Amino acid sequence: MEARAYLRHLRIGPRKVQIVLDQIRNKPINEAAAILKHTSKSACEPLFKLLKSAVANAGNNHDMNVESLYIAECFVCPGAVLKRMRPLSHGRSTRILKRTSHITMVLKER
């Protein structure tokens, strides 16, 4: 049995989120929560909320034992890219890409 939680259109680039996800993969949920609380990355706060949501899904929807859960899978996919223009000198402009992320977290019991 597994419980899933999704976070769509997070306004942080996928490369920045992947760094934090690599730290918490295959960890028990209490250890992963501690890592997310004490890591100073911008992706940690939304990932902590996503972890709490996945734990709530496991307990309420799937009747899983919350004490024995671990993060079986967590991955990030690129979402929509917001394209903005920035003016340069001599009448030119450059494109700014504001990237978004789609994050999936899967919890399983040991």
Image (cartoon, rainbow, N blue to C red):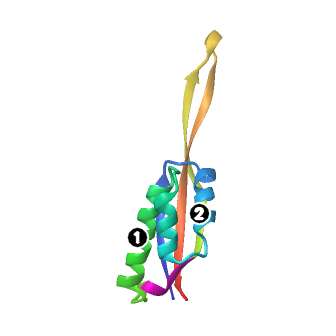
State the predominant SS element of the stretch in magenta. strand
Which residue is painted at 61% across and 64% down in the image? 23
Residue 43 in the magenta stretch? The answer is no
Q: Pinpoint residue 52: horizontal percent, then vertical percent.
A: 40, 70
Which residue is painted at 53% across and 70% down in the image? 105
CA neighbours of label 1 inside 10 A, class few (<14), some (14 to 19), many (20+) = some
Q: Pinpoint residue 109: horizontal percent, then vertical percent.
A: 52, 87
Per the rendered image, the range of residues in magenta is 67-71
The amino acid beneath tag 2 is Leu
Q: Pinpoint residue 84: horizontal percent, then vertical percent.
A: 54, 32
The residue at the far left in this view is 60
CA neighbours of label 2 inside 10 A, class few (<14), some (14 to 19), many (20+) = many
Drawn side of residue 92 relative to residue 9, left or right: right
* Vertical placement of residue 33 versus 9, above or below: below
Question: Nearest the camera: 52 or 87?
Answer: 52
Task: Specify whether residue 20 is in view.
Answer: yes
Drawn side of residue 92 relative to residue 8, left or right: right
Residue 25: assigned label: none
Residue under circle 2? 21
Residue under circle 1? 52
Secondary structure beneath dot 1 equals helix
Tell me whether circle 1 and circle 2 mark residues in contact (CB < 8 Å): no
Which residue is painted at 43% across and 88% down in the image? 64
Question: Nearest the camera: 7 or 110?
Answer: 110
Specify the quadrant that holds the C terminus.
Answer: bottom right
Residue 74 falls in image quadrant: bottom right
Q: CA distance from mark 1 to mark 2?
A: 15 Å
Q: Closer to the N terminus: mark 1 or mark 2? A: 2
Which residue is painted at 63% across and 57% down in the image? 19
The amino acid beneath tag 1 is Lys
